[in-house]
Image (tube, rainbow, N blue to C red):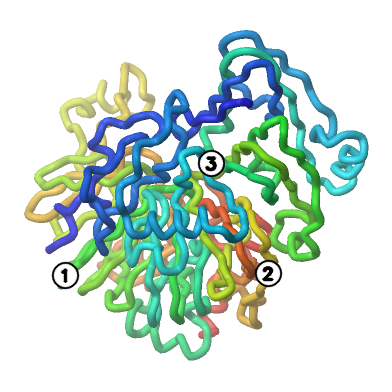
Amino acid sequence: MSYPPQPPYGQSPYDQPTQPGFAAPPPPGYGPQPGQGYPPPAPGYPQQGGYPPPPPPQQPQQAYAQEQFGGPQAPLPSTHGGSGPVVYDAFSLPVNDNVNPYAFSVDLNGSYFLQKGKMVAYYGDITFKGVGAGVLDRMIGQHFNSPMHAADWVVAQGRGKLLLADRAFDLNSYDLDEGNLTVRSGNLLAFDPSLRLKQSIIPGFLTLIGTGKFVAASNGPVHFVEPPIRVDPQALVGWADCPAPCHHYDHDYMHGLIGGIRRLTGLGGASGEEHQFEFIGAGQVLLQSSEKLMAERSVGQVDAEAGVPVGGVPSQPAASGHGGGNLNVPGLGNLGDLGRRFGL
Amino acid sequence: MAQFRLQGSRVLAVELAGEAVKARHGSMVAYTGQMSFKKLTGGGDGLRGMVARRLTGEQMTVMEVKGQGTCYFADKATEINLVRLNGETLFVEADNLLCTEGSLRTGTTFTGLNGMSSGNGLFTTKVEGHGWAAVTSNGPAIILRVDKSQPLRVDPGAYVAHTGSLHRSLKSGAGWTTVIGEGGGEAVQVEFTGEGLVYVQPSEKVTIGGDV
């Protein structure tokens, strides 16, 4: 398993004392290595007090940007010290890594699955097609299980660099190596076609199985913790390797007549933390650093059948999601599930 | 010359020694020293500009800040990007322009029918001259280079600004499946060709076209 222990983007900028103005110069010898770290955000930002910025570290792509910048050609914006903000192009964009904590760059050659509307920009020749459309129907069978609401997914096909982002939430990529990871449906952003996506038995969650990379969004940086642990329901992003997830109530506090009244009315001080999710067993639990839920994505309806949790009940989109809004992707004449039903 | 610097990534500090800067109305969060704030009607583009802004809907309420000391500006905790202009033109959505140095001229420009379906309006704001401009973005903006061999396509909701000589055209990926709600979710894209830099934000505004 390679996913959890690696800090989300190379050097985990959150651990370092934040300095105003992004002044922290990267350690000497730091250079962009594929698959690790994103370049420091715009080292050319003006510093506190207007001092000239420290000499920029020798970075190939930085040098490239500068050479392009200060070149004799068209005058383009630059800052005081001659080093401009980091400028990316199709070659200097990271390969399958974060550009900054909020944007992820995919080096596309073939196909990639992403949630609708998460493309920000791209270089190259890429087409976006609804998963359910025409010839792509075949892919559903391979990568999605049938009740899955595949209509919310898009296949990006072609060659080029693709930038993904989601409402300025933190993005992390995870590598699965013959593993499995279950994630809240609203948090999953994109995944490699080498992974299979399944609807979890637990309503509102999706499970990814296999080997490959996927990108998930979270409200604030993600933390990996090991069970046994009890977590706040709103802070849970997902879990890996099946540690038994179950509910936990602070029984003593909510016990008896007084407890019942407390629970129903909130009188006498319900802390709002009486209900937790408990994880036991080996694995990793992913937590986001806020209690703001990402709006849930419809994962489609499970057939009503004895023994199937929430079978036959359409999944309820969370009303309290970030930004609210209807996530059933309104379009021109969106027919909702109907298109799916008729195999369009 | 007014000194622009970032205080953190979400607050812009401008040091003034008697000069004036133009800033979005109500964006001042704090200041030290002596400052005067004067509302400029019509985006501070003069009478002709005022009429143009009224007509084009690229409304921008701007104040002129003048004085001695440091003035701090911020807008809804959005990230601030400083752009230094040396005679070239910056095209930016009026919503994203926070502050410009007094030496810069602002105006509106026609973007063609392309803007309309992307929800950004038919017109955009043009900043030209020599000096600093501060542009806000939801999440730190990513600067992408466009040259002749590398055209760039951008989601209209993520577009913030661009500089250089770029041609902007609308590309549609919509097919018959879009009409029945099974489209690719990226039906409308803006293509940039030419030479220049495009600023995109890691977030998407709600646009008319963006949801299709």
**How packed is label 1: few (under 14 Cα within 10 Å), some, or many (20 or more)?**
some
Residue drawn at point x = 38 percent, y = 54 percent: A62
Above or below for A76 versus A23 = below
Horizontal arrangement in the rendering, residue A1 relative to residue A213 (left or right): left
Q: Residue at x 22, y 40 (%)?
A: A231
Disc 2 is attached to a residue of which chain? A
Q: Position of residue A334 (x, y in %)?
A: 63, 70
Query: Considering only order in the chain, which callout, 2 or 1, is on the residue closer to the N terminus?
Result: 1
SS class, disc 1: strand
Image disc number at residue A177: 1
- In this view, the residue in front, A184 or A288, is A288
On the same chain, marks 3 and 1? The answer is no
* Residue A155 at least partly seen: no
Amino acid carrying mark 2 in the image: Leu
Left or right: residue A71 versus residue B103 is: left
What label does residue B81 carry, if any?
3
- Label 2 neighbour load within 10 Å: few <14, some 14-19, many 20+: some
Where residue A119 appears, as percent x and y from the top left, is 50, 64
Q: CA distance from mark 3 to mark 1?
A: 39 Å
Locate residue B29, reporting x and y percent: 58, 20
**Which residue position is annotated with label 2?**
A332
Query: Which three-letter amino acid code belongs to the residue tagged 3?
Result: Asn
Closer to the eye: label 2 or 3: 3
On-image quarter of the N terminus of chain B: top right
Q: Nearer the viewer, mark 1 or mark 2?
A: 1
Q: Residue furthest left?
A: A282
* Mark 3 residue crowding within 10 angstroms, few (<14) / some (14–19) / many (20+): many
